[in-house]
Image (tube, rainbow, N blue to C red):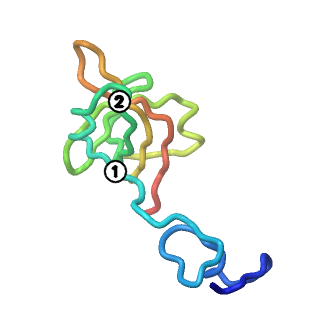
Amino acid sequence: MKNVSPDSDSATNMGGFGPQPNSAVGGFEGPGLVITSAKDAAAMRDDAYVTLRGNIVQHLGKDKYLFQDASGTIKVEIDNDKWLGQVVEPGDAVELHGEIEKEWFSDAEVDVERVIKLQQ
């Protein structure tokens, strides 16, 4: 194993995500974030954590929105503080992190904890 000084400038010696040849510091090597489709999210159990990628296509009133990806749509709830100043339009790709909420007699929806506007 190669000795690495803490002040080394080499990026390959700093560790991080993915295979790191010649790395003495280490890092994570394995699968990344799992993206859930709107269709699959609608069938998941209450309180399951999901990450969705697609578009917010419609405001349904108050803090409810319609999210869409290639598989279909699902209703999402996004509180005002979760936008973090981002302006999102229907054509903007977003990543939403949240939990499934299921009530007895209503369709599943996602309670969004984080909104990320993706670069296109």
Q: Quadrant of the C terminus?
A: bottom left
* Residue 9 shown left or right of residue 33 in the figure: right
Determine whether the residue tagged by mark 2 lies in a helix, strand or loop: strand
First-in-chain label (2 vs 1): 1
* Residue 115 shown left or right of residue 36 in the figure: right
Q: Is residue 3 above or below residue 114?
A: below
State the residue in front, 116 or 9: 9
State the residue in front, 56 or 102: 102
* Residue 103 shown left or right of residue 92 in the figure: left
* Residue 13 shown left or right of residue 74 in the figure: right
Residue drawn at 30 percent across, 21 percent down: 102
Residue drawn at 20 percent across, 42 percent down: 72
Kindly identify the amino acid type of the residue bearing the numbered disc 2: Ile
Residue that extends furthest to the top in the rendered view of this protein: 104
Kindly identify the amino acid type of the residue bearing the numbered disc 1: Ile
Residue drawn at 27 percent across, 43 percent down: 68
Quadrant of the rendered image containing residue 38: top left
Residue that extends furthest to the front in the rendered view of this protein: 1
The residue indicated by pointer 2 is 100
Where in the figure is residue 98, as x and y percent of width and height?
A: 43, 36
Q: Quadrant of the N terminus?
A: bottom right
Q: CA distance from mark 2 to mark 1?
A: 14 Å
The residue indicated by pointer 1 is 35
Where in the figure is residue 48, as x and y percent of width and height?
A: 36, 33
Q: Is residue 8 above or below residue 17?
A: below
Near mark 1 (Cα within 10 A), the count class, few <14, some 14-19 or many ≥20, is: some
Where in the figure is residue 24, as x and y percent of width and height?
A: 64, 77
